[in-house]
Image (spheres, grey):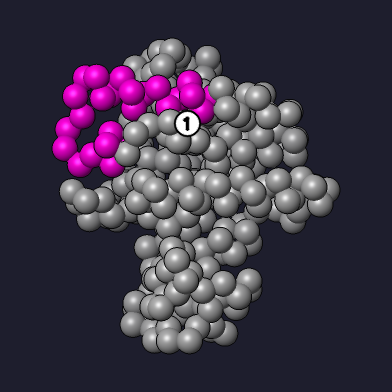
């Protein structure tokens, strides 16, 4: 792997992903010894080898493309939804052995914000503080997302993760004010990863924080915002997650890529 400094100064003219051949301005790329790798292919490497039938894999690619489009709408950094889904799997594999259950956690994390498709741009993209009425609309994305995913075949557990992804371990979240083990395990793991990704990504009002700063905040909030079990899994996988955050932060856009 090419170092971070090299990645920031690499000349990308004429380059494309060496794995899938894409060259898109909407994707971010990592410089490697033999060329560039797009973030999508990089995340694919982190997932177990596919065992699903061809139809399910096609379904997976469609949903991943949909969430990538939603991330672009919300001006998220790179492939936010796929990234948090992949990173949540890192924690889930420490606690869950059943492949079907792991797939449900992946789907739920991937589709966590699908309900925002029903939130108007004027609210979703607003940079100023939201009014109480606007917050009510914004918070409705959870139940909207749950209703969408719950209608899909064999996605009950994934839908429950979507419905729980804004809950807090201490009961201070929404929409149902669940606490502790009332919250789906996948959602408790996702909460840690979503916060890690948010804190280590640039925002309009601040620059990305270092991994160590994000880690300290996550540990501080164990038992309140986060399940201590999920935080323990996060600490156990620190090396892997640190590497993945470093790769995210070193990714660059290739000039002249297709939209």
User: In the rendered view, would you say 32 is above or below 245?
Assistant: below
Side of 90 where 101 appears, left or right: right
Q: Is residue 235 visible?
A: no
Q: Which residue is mark 1?
A: 115
User: In the rendered view, would you say 147 is above or below 77?
Assistant: above
Q: Name the residue at 68% across, 47% down.
A: 60
Camera-side residue of 99 and 123: 123
Side of 108 where 30 appears, left or right: left
Q: Is residue 254 magenta?
A: no
Q: Position of residue 22 (x, y in %)?
A: 56, 72
* Tally of marks: 1
Q: Position of residue 197 (x, y in %)?
A: 39, 48
Q: Quadrant of residue 10?
A: bottom left
* Magenta residues, start to end: 122-146
Number of other residues with Cα within 10 Å of mark 1, as a class: few under 14, some 14 to 19, many 20 or more: many
**Majority secondary structure of magenta residues:** helix
Side of 29 where 106 appears, left or right: right
Q: Position of residue 235 (x, y in %)?
A: 46, 44
Q: Position of residue 220 (x, y in %)?
A: 31, 34
- Give the secondary structure at mark 1: helix
Camera-side residue of 98 and 58: 58
User: In the rendered view, would you say 128 is above or below 10?
Assistant: above
Q: Name the residue at 21% across, 19% down.
A: 132
User: In the rendered view, would you say 29 is above or below 101?
Assistant: below
Camera-side residue of 126 and 108: 126
Q: Name the residue at 45% across, 66% down.
A: 259
Q: Is residue 20 visible?
A: yes
């Amino acid at each position: 792997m090419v170092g971070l400094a090299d990645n920031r100064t690499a000349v990308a003219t004429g380059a494309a992903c060496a794995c899938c051949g894409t060259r898109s301005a909407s994707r971010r790329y990592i410089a490697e010894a033999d060329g560039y790798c797009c973030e999508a292919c990089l995340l694919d490497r982190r997932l177990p080898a596919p065992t699903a039938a061809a139809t399910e894999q096609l379904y997976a690619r469609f949903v991943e493309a949909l969430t990538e489009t939603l991330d672009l709408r919300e001006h998220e950094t790179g492939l936010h939804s796929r990234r948090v889904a992949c990173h949540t799997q890192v924690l889930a594999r420490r606690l869950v052995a059943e492949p079907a259950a792991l797939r449900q956690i992946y789907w739920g994390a991937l589709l966590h914000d699908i309900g925002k498709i029903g939130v108007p741009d004027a609210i979703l993209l607003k940079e100023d503080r939201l009014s109480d009425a606007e917050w009510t609309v914004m918070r409705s994305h959870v139940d909207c997302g749950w209703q969408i995913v719950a209608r899909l075949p064999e996605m009950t557990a994934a839908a429950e993760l979507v419905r729980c992804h804004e809950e807090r371990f201490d009961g201070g979240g929404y929409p149902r004010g669940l606490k502790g083990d009332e919250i789906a395990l996948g959602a408790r793991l996702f909460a840690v990863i979503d916060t890690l990704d948010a804190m280590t990504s640039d925002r309009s009002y601040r620059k990305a924080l270092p991994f160590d700063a994000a880690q300290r905040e996550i540990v501080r909030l164990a038992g309140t915002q986060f399940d201590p079990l999920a935080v323990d899994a996060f600490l156990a996988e620190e090396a892997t997650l640190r590497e993945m955050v470093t790769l995210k932060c070193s990714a660059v856009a290739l000039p002249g890529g297709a939209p």
